[in-house]
Image (tube, coloured by chain):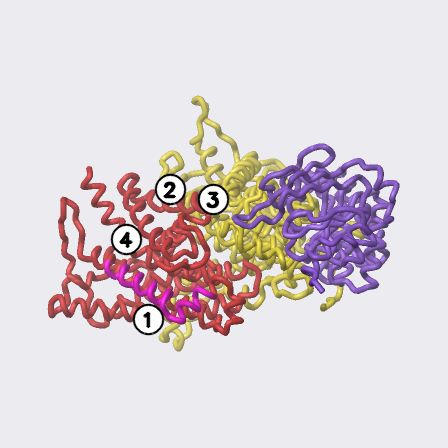
Chain colours: A purple, B red, C yellow
């Protein structure tokens, strides 16, 4: 089994999706989705293109309002909250297409991630009051330690424009930014997209390390089957907005519906 | 009372039909490149000035001055309008090439700022050319009043309505029946697919500006005939009203632009009646703000230019 | 993918804990302090006036440069600040029969507060609007505000307010009593230098703080900013309020210096005037917009007049087409050319903010992570103050999800 089997079996639900549905006009992107992520788990959502996976993320993080259904975090319904309120509740994310603030430095990107936890207001900032200065210093240290998690490279490049970084580095900074808000649940949207084998392996390693070091629960969308199989405690499979399978990686691997969804109908010999 | 309402309705419709012509220019351009052509109102204003200079060149600078009766008056009118349309089409195309085309890939803020700049350039050059003050603009055709059921309608009002209808009809035919028109619709819907189909996007966009400019030019001539003056300030005020019309009707929607134009014309007429001249502009602005805030898609909201 | 060399950001150097360029700033300040000793009074007066516009440019820079909100009606807040002072100075505001009169000094803060309030009020309707529409609405407000002043008797109507008081005398240590009068520009000059310095410091501190970062992040990518915990509504309103407050202070100063306030002083061209300063100098760049403001002010108030004199002085030119041109009348033409030319040739401005240049030239790798993505197509209303563009849905969802964009509620 993957990851921390004992933790996975703790079965304390952190996030629960109940009959989550999202409709855009005539198109149903997500249909009646039930999903549970337990504390400490790494759960993957997989499925063919257009299956609605990112829509689920957008629903959880408040970018979309659900058409119906509930999104329950630690027992409280968060469906329909604006994205910044969702961050306050403890959920942050990365994006499939990496959305860093290209014209801010690496360090500033991670500092932005701390926005919800910083107390400075317009006046304390304009006047640079001692409390604000202290807070900024601490924030900077925290940002640096987050960058350090990925190695000394990023720390050395803290003052560089985020858009000048390599793809893999930008992905790391994006994750660091998401971590900066001290989330309890981290959503990673195709974290290994665009990476080669060794970069992917490294990403898998640090994702697992994230769970260990930060005590995070992780929900990820993954397109690469090997990654999903290798990293997840449980996997949920979506197709055309519906859940078609759910379970342990080995079960999913052998599931006919899943194979069919990805490869099309089996031809009869 | 009813008569008053009717009267303002006629006034509103006449002006509104001109607003509609200008609004079409905004909407066509927005539909195809998602840009508000701030300079469009100034192109309209240039139509007035070009017409005025033509008329002056012919020595026509007062009402009822054209010898030869109605026929020659109409002849002069047609000539003037045609020339204004051609010139304004050209101006609009130049604006596109110089101020917008280089910025097609730039972030949104850039062409927006450039559009403002283009507007200023057109405005001030007109001011440079024709001066600060309003200039007298002759009515060209005889200004006759017809009174029906207590409501007065002038020949120029009729002209405005007739010309607008003709031009809008022609536009509709062009867009729905010709290849170039189809190219415009395709580009508005999906520029990439259109390009893949072999449509020359650059030319299509240029064509859109041509059409918009021509319509604005025609409107410029008739508008000046109606209010009897040509003044560079009108570019901005009328432009904003026409833009409000386009937004009210649903930016990108051709029927919407026509409808919006008429509505704004009528609303303006009633507002002037109720609140007086000085508040009219505020009312129209207020309508604009309200529409954009509460129903940005307008009445018929869709970004794709549709068949009229 | 291109990997570009490391680029340092301007401004606060977090590592060393100082502001880059502070040395230069200090030198500049010293020059400013000694300026009236070497320059004649007309130049000092001009410099003081330029200071007004520099302050406004700094304010607009917050809205347009930092937060990326194209405000075309910025002069409205200048008007509001000026009128606020005019009205309390003239005793035009009475509550329960008690007239409120405040002198200049508290009104510096008072004007800022009133302007900030209206900044938020006028900014509120624009919160969900995209660039084009936002600009138009702010333009509309910029037109409406002076019109309201002009058409309302209680607000001075066409004639406005005249005979306003200059700032009351204040006593300073070492310097004694400072008297203000319409004929002596020097005290006004130093006043704007002090105000300006405080404002510059405040803005510089703001930019490298939590809220400053939030503004820039929001400008770069609204969705990513929201998903990083930034409340878009509050952040935008703050930008409007802060920007407006600076314009308000400038307005109060202006009214007390000119002692007259009329609606004509605040029309749309003033808003564009400030915008040109910001665009020319460099959107988002504090030294840039200050330079842009100084340059445009100089061109507007001096260069054009001088050009007139020069052209008419040279017989060859005076008789040519150029000779018939009154250069002071074509300032808008010049602004228009500057706006278009800057956007095409050097959108980052004269002194780029270090960031802007690369963004506007479309260089670098992450075009997706730049503000381009969030701005293209329709918007979907997703609740409390968050606007989402259907196309950024596509970016958020990857290629496959772009099908959804086509099916959404259409252009909002």
- Looking at marks 1 and 4 on the same chain, the residue that comes earlier in the sequence is marked by 4
Q: Nearer the viewer, residue B27 or B94?
A: B27
In the drawing, what numbered circle is on residue B15?
4
What's the distance in space between the residues labelled 1 and 4, CA to CA? 22 Å
- Looking at marks 3 and 4 on the same chain, the residue that comes earlier in the sequence is marked by 4
In the drawing, what numbered circle is on residue B86?
1
Q: Nearer the viewer, mark 2 or mark 4?
A: 4
- x, y percent for residue C295: 55, 60
Instruction: Give the labeled residue for mark 3.
Output: B293
What's the distance in space between the residues labelled 3 and 1, CA to CA? 36 Å
Q: Can marks 3 and 4 be said to lie on one chain?
A: yes
Q: Residues within 10 Å of mark 2 (few under 14, many from 20)?
A: many
Q: Nearer the viewer, residue A264 or C176?
A: A264
Q: Nearer the viewer, mark 3 or mark 1?
A: 3
What's the distance in space between the residues labelled 2 and 4, CA to CA? 26 Å
- x, y percent for residue A174: 74, 53
* SS class, disc 3: helix
Instruction: Give the labeled residue for mark 2.
Output: C150
- x, y percent for residue A60: 67, 43
The quarter holding residue A153 reads: bottom right
What's the distance in space between the residues labelled 3 and 4, CA to CA? 26 Å
Q: Nearer the viewer, residue B89 or A74?
A: A74
* Segment colored magenta: B162-186
Magenta stretch: helix, strand or loop mostly = helix
Q: Is residue C15 left or right of residue C284?
A: right
- State which chain disc 1 sits on: B
- State which chain disc 4 sits on: B
């Amino acid at each position: 089994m993957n990851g921390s089997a004992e933790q996975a079996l703790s079965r304390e639900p952190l996030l629960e999706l109940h009959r989550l549905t999202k409709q855009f006009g005539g198109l149903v992107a997500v249909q009646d989705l039930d999903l549970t992520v337990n504390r400490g788990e790494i759960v993957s959502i997989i499925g063919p293109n257009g299956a609605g996976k990112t829509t689920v993320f957008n629903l959880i993080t408040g970018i979309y309002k659900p058409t119906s259904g509930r999104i329950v975090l630690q027992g409280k319904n968060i469906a329909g909250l604006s994205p910044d309120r969702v961050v306050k509740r403890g959920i942050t994310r990365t994006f499939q297409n990496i959305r860093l603030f290209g014209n801010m430095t690496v360090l500033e990107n991670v500092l932005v991630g701390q926005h919800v936890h910083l107390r400075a207001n317009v006046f304390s900032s304009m006047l640079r009051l001692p409390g604000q200065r202290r807070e900024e210093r601490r924030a900077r240290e925290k940002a640096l330690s987050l960058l350090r998690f990925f190695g000394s490279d990023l720390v050395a490049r803290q003052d560089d424009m985020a858009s000048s970084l390599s793809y893999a580095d930008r992905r790391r900074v994006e994750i660091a930014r998401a971590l900066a808000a001290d989330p309890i649940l981290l959503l990673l949207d195709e974290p290994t997209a665009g990476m080669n084998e060794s970069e992917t392996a490294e990403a898998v390693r640090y994702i697992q390390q994230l769970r260990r070091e930060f005590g995070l629960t992780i929900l990820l969308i993954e397109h690469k089957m090997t990654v999903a199989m290798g990293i997840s405690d449980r996997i949920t499979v979506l197709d055309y907005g519906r859940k078609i399978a759910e379970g342990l990686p080995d079960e999913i691997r052998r599931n006919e519906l899943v194979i069919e969804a990805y490869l099309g109908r089996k031809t009869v010999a | 009372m009813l008569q008053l309402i009717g009267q303002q309705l006629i006034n509103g419709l006449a002006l509104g039909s001109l607003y509609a012509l200008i609004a079409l220019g905004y909407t066509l351009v927005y539909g195809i490149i998602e840009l508000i052509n701030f300079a469009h109102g100034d192109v309209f204003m240039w139509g007035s000035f070009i017409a005025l200079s033509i008329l002056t060149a012919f020595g026509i600078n007062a009402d009822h001055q054209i010898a030869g009766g109605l026929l020659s008056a109409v002849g002069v009118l047609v000539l003037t309008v045609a020339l204004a349309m051609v010139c304004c089409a050209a101006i609009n195309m130049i604006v596109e090439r110089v101020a917008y085309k280089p910025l097609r890939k730039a972030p949104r803020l850039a062409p927006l700022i450039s559009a403002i700049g283009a507007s200023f350039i057109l405005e001030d050059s007109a001011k440079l050319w024709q001066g600060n003050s309003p200039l007298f603009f002759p009515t060209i055709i005889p200004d006759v009043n017809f009174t029906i059921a207590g409501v007065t309608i002038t020949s120029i009002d009729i002209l405005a309505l007739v010309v607008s209808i003709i031009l809008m009809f022609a536009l509709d035919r062009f867009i729905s029946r010709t290849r170039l028109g189809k190219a415009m619709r395709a580009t508005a819907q999906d520029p990439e697919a259109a390009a893949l189909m072999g449509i020359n996007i650059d030319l299509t966009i240029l064509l859109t500006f041509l059409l918009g400019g021509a319509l604005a030019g025609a409107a410029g001539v008739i508008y000046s005939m109606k209010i009897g003056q040509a003044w560079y300030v009108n570019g901005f005020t009328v432009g904003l009203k026409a833009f409000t019309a386009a937004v009210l009707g649903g930016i990108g929607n051709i029927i919407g632009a026509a409808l919006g134009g008429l509505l704004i014309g009528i609303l303006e007429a009633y507002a002037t009646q109720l609140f007086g001249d000085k508040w009219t502009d505020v009312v129209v602005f207020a309508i604009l703000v309200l529409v954009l805030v509460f129903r940005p898609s307008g009445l018929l909201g869709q970004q794709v230019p549709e068949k009229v | 993918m291109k990997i570009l060399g490391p680029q340092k950001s301007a401004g606060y150097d977090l590592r060393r804990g100082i502001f880059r360029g502070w040395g230069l700033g200090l030198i500049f300040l010293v020059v400013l302090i000694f300026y009236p000793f070497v320059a004649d009074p007309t130049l000092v007066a001009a410099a003081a006036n330029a200071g007004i516009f520099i302050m406004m440019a700094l304010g607009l820079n917050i809205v347009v440069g930092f937060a990326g909100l194209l405000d075309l009606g910025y002069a409205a807040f200048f008007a509001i600040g000026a009128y606020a002072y005019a009205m309390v100075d003239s005793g035009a505001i009475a509550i329960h029969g008690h007239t409120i009169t405040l002198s200049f000094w508290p009104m510096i803060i008072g004007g800022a507060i009133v302007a900030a309030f209206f900044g938020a009020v006028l900014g509120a309707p624009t919160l969900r609007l995209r660039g084009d529409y936002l600009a138009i609405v702010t333009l509309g407000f910029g037109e409406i505000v002076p019109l309201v002043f002009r058409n309302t008797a209680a607000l001075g109507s066409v004639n406005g307010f005249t005979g306003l008081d200059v700032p009351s005398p204040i006593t300073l240590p070492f310097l004694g009593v400072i008297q203000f009068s319409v004929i002596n520009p020097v005290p006004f000059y130093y006043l704007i230098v002090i105000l300006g310095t405080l404002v510059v410091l405040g803005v510089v501190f703001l930019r490298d703080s939590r809220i400053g970062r939030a503004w820039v992040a929001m400008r770069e990518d609204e969705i990513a900013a929201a998903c990083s915990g930034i409340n878009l509504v509050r952040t935008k309103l703050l930008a409007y309020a802060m920007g407006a407050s600076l314009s308000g202070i400038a307005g109060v100063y202006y009214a007390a210096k000119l002692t007259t306030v009329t609606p004509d002083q605040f029309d749309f061209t003033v808003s564009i005037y400030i915008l040109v300063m910001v665009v020319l100098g460099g959107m988002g760049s504090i030294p840039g917009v200050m330079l842009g403001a100084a340059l445009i002010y100089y061109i507007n108030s001096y260069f054009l007049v001088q050009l007139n004199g020069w052209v008419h002085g040279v017989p060859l030119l005076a008789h040519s087409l150029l000779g018939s041109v009154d250069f002071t009348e074509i300032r808008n033409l010049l602004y228009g050319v500057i706006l278009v030319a800057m956007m095409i040739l050097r959108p980052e401005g004269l002194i780029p903010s270090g960031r802007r240049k690369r963004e506007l030239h479309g260089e670098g790798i992450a075009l997706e992570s730049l503000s381009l993505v969030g701005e293209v197509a329709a918007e979907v209303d997703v609740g409390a103050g968050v606007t989402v563009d259907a196309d950024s849905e596509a970016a958020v969802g990857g290629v496959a999800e772009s099908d959804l964009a086509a099916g959404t509620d259409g252009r909002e």
